[in-house]
Amino acid sequence: MSDSAVTVSGYLEATARQRIRGFFDAGSVKELLGPAERVTSPHLPALGIPVAFDDGIVVGEARLESKAVMFAAQEPAFMGGSVGEVHGAKLTGILLRAARDKPAGVVLLLDTGGVRLHEANAGLIAISEIQRAAFEARAAGVPVIVVSAGINGCYGGLGIVTRGCDWVVMSEEGRLSVSGPEVIEAQHGVEEFDARDRALVWRTMGGKHRYLLGEADALAADSFAGLRAAVAPLLGQSRALDLQSLQREHEALGRRLARFGDAPDATDIWRRLGVDDVRAVPMMAPDAFVAMAQPLREHADG
Amino acid sequence: MENLSFEFGPFPPRAQPLPTVLVGVVGSGNMEALCEPAALDGRMRFEVHSSIRGYAATWEAVLGDFARRVRIPDVRVTINDAGATPAVVGLRLSQAAAELESGA
């Protein structure tokens, strides 16, 4: 089932269903719990808010460069891609299905502000269930790959879950953090973080910064071809998930804190990493940026 | 919320069975429409769930105009609306009709 015959070249502004059609092999997508099954939010009608037939997320099975994968894609326009009870259960379900059936990977096309506040505790519980299910898939040897290249970024509980997955692929336009810009400004004041300063937002949370910090494993152009090419080599490739790898990660975070803890701005971190012209970074094309940043960036496994 | 339903027709039967089609998203100023084959004695049935109250007459005019234009029998169209204007409703329905006719 499609929502438009119109071709969209960029990923950023596409709907969830356009993204699935552009991302996976033609004709390979099989949706589970599709809109006709009407598994919708039990909470929104009580608040006078219209439901969506898919609760803002499409889950299913597909192929990527002929390899069997499972996927979830959040619809950015429905309540900010937020995680409600049903939405979260669909994400949990596809991860547990992957742990059972062992495809070459689970690709999560995330685009979310986090928990759907209207569904409160049900949304928060959903996040913990998603986290656990992601670890179950990883423990079963199925790599969990997050793509954060959407209009809402990837924030809140799913920002935390993302860093517990095997791989993170971003575009420059993608963002990854826990508290969003408006939340930080509301909590700590505009002197701490000006949410309207888009340059500040992107150099603090955007794809290029996350790549330089080693939190994003790949940075691709905002195109289906670019993102596909970044995700495909990660299929079948799991990261270690054991005590040793966790200790290494904590040591790396400790080193990062010692090295950059007093840096007032992301550009200071880039300078200390050895980036010559930090002011040129935002204007660099993805390929040129990766060529420059790859030898300098932090490595989580370092 | 306002929950409305309308029926139009009957319209002449078709040889080809209709696919199930979803168009649009429930975003601000937008809507989604799920079109499914249903035994309705040739009529088109619309079920509208809208966050905006008080526009029943406008919905009836826009949906009735659409139904009499496309004349698709035995289809149930369920709409989740987040404040789409009549023009947006018309475009979404035209998109749905195009996908129903093409068997998408």
Image (cartoon, coloured by chain):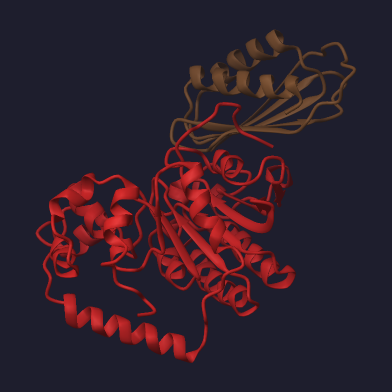
Outermost residue to the right: B15
Question: As displayed, is residue A224 above or below residue A298?
Answer: above
Chain B rendering hue: brown
In this rendering, the answer to whether A285 lies above or below A268 is above
Location of residue B60 with respect to A44 vertically, above or below:
above
Toward which corner of the image does residue A247 lie, by quadrant? bottom left
Q: Quadrant of residue A51?
A: top right
In x, y percent, where is residue A186? 21, 59
Q: Is residue A105 left or right of residue A260?
A: right
- Between A267 and A100, the one lying in front of the other is A267
Which quadrant of the view contains residue A268? bottom left
Q: Nearer the viewer, residue B2 or A264?
A: A264
Residue A267: x and y in percent read: 15, 60
Query: In the displayed structure, does residue A269 sit left or right of residue A37?
Result: left
Residue in the picture at 38% in, 82% down: A249
Residue A273, x across and y down, in percent? 19, 69
Any part of residue A206 in sight: no
Above or below, comparing residue A195 to residue B48 in the picture = below
Q: Nearer the viewer, residue A145 or B70?
A: A145
